[in-house]
Image (cartoon, grey):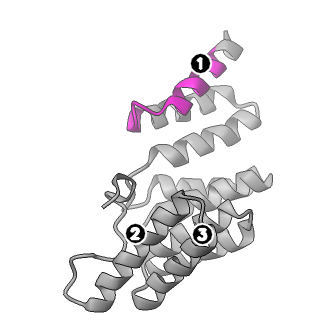
Amino acid sequence: MNDMLDGIGGPDHTADDPAEREAAFSFQEAYRLQMAGKLDEAIALYERSIALHPTAEAYTFLGWTYSFKGDIDRAIAECHNAIGIDPDFGNPYNDIGAYLIERGDPWSAVPWLKKAMTAQRYECYFYPHFNYARVLEQQGKLIEALEHYQQALDYNHNYTAATKAIRRIQCKVN
């Protein structure tokens, strides 16, 4: 399994159910195609995976692929589908928040990012903290933004975007 997919879950490629195994294969192949820039092919395979065995991961990654194509509305809709399957999965909450920020609606992103920060099943808590800090920084709330950038860095010590953001704010504050 690709390192990027470790901890993400998705359909179980070792499952007894042949449909679930095929869904896992389709999911992993879709991810490979997505990373290779073959977005339409990836979409078709994510949809196949979902048809065989719907998972929050497959819907979230399908949404992510739509975001690569610039279809933010569809990306958000797929994240809502993911939440409908597993409301404890943090990725779609953060992704909705990030898409809303990208769309220029940072205030609407805040509740989604806060849900991602407290999601029961999430491997990447640094993302919603980083995205929330971006919103705070845009609002001129530099000290609060600095705290959330630091929390992102605490969750992932190698997150260079957070390190750069912390330095940027420290320069502004000093």
User: Is residue 3 rendered to the left or right of residue 39?
Assistant: left
The quarter of the picture where the C terminus appears is top right
The type of residue carrying mark 3 is: Gly
* Real-space Cα separation, disc 3 to disc 1, in angstroms: 32 Å
* Number of numbered tags placed on the structure image: 3
- Residue that label 2 marks: 28
Crowdedness near tag 3: few (<14), some (14–19) or many (≥20) residues, C-alpha within 10 Å: many
Dot placed on the residue nearer the N-terminal end, 3 or 1: 3
Q: Nearer the viewer, residue 159 or 28?
A: 28
Q: Nearer the viewer, residue 101 or 3?
A: 3
Dot placed on the residue nearer the N-terminal end, 2 or 3: 2
User: Is residue 140 rendered to the left or right of residue 23?
Assistant: right
Q: Which residues are magenta?
A: 154-170
Q: Secondary structure at mark 1?
A: helix
| Residue 70: image tag | none
- Residue that label 1 marks: 167
- Residue that label 3 marks: 63
Question: Is 89 covered by the magenta stretch?
Answer: no
Q: Position of residue 31 (x, y in %)?
A: 47, 65
Q: Residue at x 60, y 60 (%)?
A: 37
Dot placed on the residue nearer the N-terminal end, 1 or 2: 2
The type of residue carrying mark 2 is: Gln
Quarter of the rendering containing residue 114: bottom right
Q: From this view, report whether residue 156 is shown above or below residue 116.
A: above
